[in-house]
Image (tube, rainbow, N blue to C red):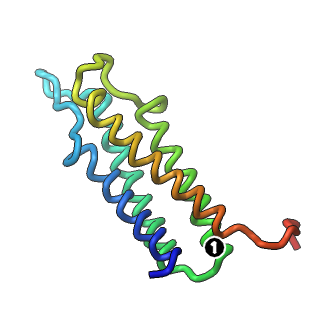
Amino acid sequence: MKRDKIIGVIFIALGILVALTPCVIAPTCGPMENGMFMKCHWMGRAVMGSGVMMAILGCAYFYVCSSNVKFAFGFSSFIVGIYTLLLPAYLIGGCMNKEMMCQAKTMPTVYIFAGIYSLVGLAAMILNRRKDASCRCE
């Protein structure tokens, strides 16, 4: 299997893992006694959507032939990976108690998967960068 196909499969697998993390692999906290959900539930929903986007970008990367387009998908994957890292860290967050399920399991798992995804996106950008020194638009 070619290097680019392997990177595409890694993108797809990590996207699926990120999408499954908040509901299957390391579920977020359940609802409170009054039935309302905590903010970690909504963080989990956003992470699921981001994981689906990661898998879609991986499918696109897998089927594209052009090196320039693969570079663009690598860049997009890197940005989506960073965005996914920021969701639990700063943008939405989780419960305040460090012993809650989201803080103990969900968020670290998302950090690991999204971090690896971002690094693979960075590697895809490096591997598909333009070989010539001219970077001007024509």
Compare residues 97 and 38 and report the one nearer the observer: 97
Please state which amino acid type lies under the numbered disc 1.
Val
Q: Is residue 12 left or right of residue 103?
A: right
Instruction: Quadrant for the N terminus, please.
Output: bottom left
Quarter of the rendering containing residue 73 = bottom right
Per the image, the residue denoted by label 1 is: 69
Label 1 sits on a secondary structure element that is: helix
* Residue placed most toward the observer, 116 or 91: 116
| Residue at the image position 29 percent from the left and 37 percent from the top | 106
Q: Residue furthest left?
A: 33
Residue at position x 66%, y 62% in the image? 126
Res 97 → quadrant: top left
User: Quick check: 80 left or right of 128?
Assistant: left
Determine the residue positioned at 58% across, 64% down: 124
| Vertical side of 83 occupied by 2: above or below | below
Where is residue 128 drawn, in percent x and y? 65, 70
In the rendered image, residue 11, in percent from the top left (x then y), is placed at 44, 63
Mark 1, residues whose alpha carbon is within 10 Å: few (<14), some, or many (≥20)? some
What x and y, as percent, mark residue 74?
Answer: 58, 62
Side of 45 relative to 124 (left or right): left
Number of residue marks? 1
Q: Quadrant of the image for the C terminus?
A: bottom right
Q: Position of residue 3 (x, y in %)?
A: 52, 75
